[in-house]
Image: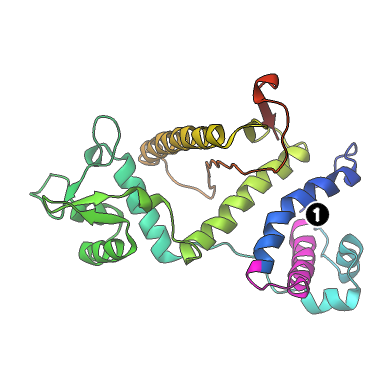
Amino acid sequence: MTGPTQPPDLDVSKLQPALARLLRPLVRLFIRQGITFPAIADLLRELYVNVAEYDFGLAGKSQTDSRVSLLTGIHRKEVRRLRGSGAPVSTTPVTLSRTSRILACWLAASSFTDEQGHPLPLPRVAPAGEPSFDTLVEMVTKDVRPRAVLDDWLDRGVVAIDERDRVRLLDTAFVPRGGDPQQMHYFGRNLHDHIAAAVANIEGRSPRFLERAVHYDGLSEAAARQLEHTSRQLALESLQTANRAAHTLCDSDGGGSWRWNFGVYVFAEPTGQQIEPPAAHPAEVQEG
């Protein structure tokens, strides 16, 4: 296997300011959580060796300690100690995978949505052939009772029981609790995929991944919050449309070894720097 190569026209020094900006919020998180620099340095050392070992092998040749040391700048003694730990494996917790699949079905299947594509409130049980929460769960898994799923979701604030004793999906279903295993899983997966798409574009992969943003500077707080609200609504509509398309396609797909991720983000913050009014600047559409 031949690993990715550096594009000949890439000025590595230009990466440093971008990396500093990229890493700054992560360093802020590390400090707040008590993760020290030596701990991150140890993790980076392991990752450098692991990536060099598994992603930069030469076709038909076994990877050696000397080559890993050359690629990473880490002493061969340390390379020898760290090699062989196995490539990092990204796994989705069983409960999270099950929850995601049930929610995806509720948000996409025509029998569980209204004409506008909104998730219907579902009776807990219903006559055969009619939609219910039990049939929703049983369409996705037979390994757990619908009542157990309902109790778990009620406790986590994913659903609520309305005045007609129907199970209603809440908006908070899309927002994991701060710091819980769900949020940590998506934190790693979604940031990985966004960065991986941007890196692939820098490396000149073809076709390029879609990685764009629209941004304005010099806004008032009111304007920034209004744009945040508007873009949040647009983002949710896009996610729901993509979910319905994927759900429909999966009905006829034979399966395989690929995965797909479509994500969006919205961000706003005070900069502490007053600049010209935004009207003086046209919209900037950034493509990675």
Give the residue at mark 1.
59
Assign the magenta stretch its main secondary structure: helix
Residue 237 horizontal side relative to residue 231, left or right:
left
Q: Is residue 2 visible?
A: no
Q: Quadrant of the C terminus?
A: top right
Query: Which residue is at the front of the view, 256 or 221?
Result: 221
Q: Position of residue 22 (x, y in %)?
A: 73, 50
Display coloring:
rainbow
Q: Quadrant of residue 223?
A: top right
Q: Which residues are magenta?
A: 32-56
Q: Is residue 57 visible?
A: yes
Q: Quadrant of residue 40?
A: bottom right
Q: Quadrant of the N terminus?
A: bottom right
Residue shown at 73% from the left, 55% from the top: 24
Mark 1 residue type: Ala
Question: Could you tell me which secondary element the residue under label 1 belongs to?
Answer: loop
Residue shown at 63% from the left, 52% from the top: 192
**Which residue in the rendered view is the most extreme toward the left?**
127
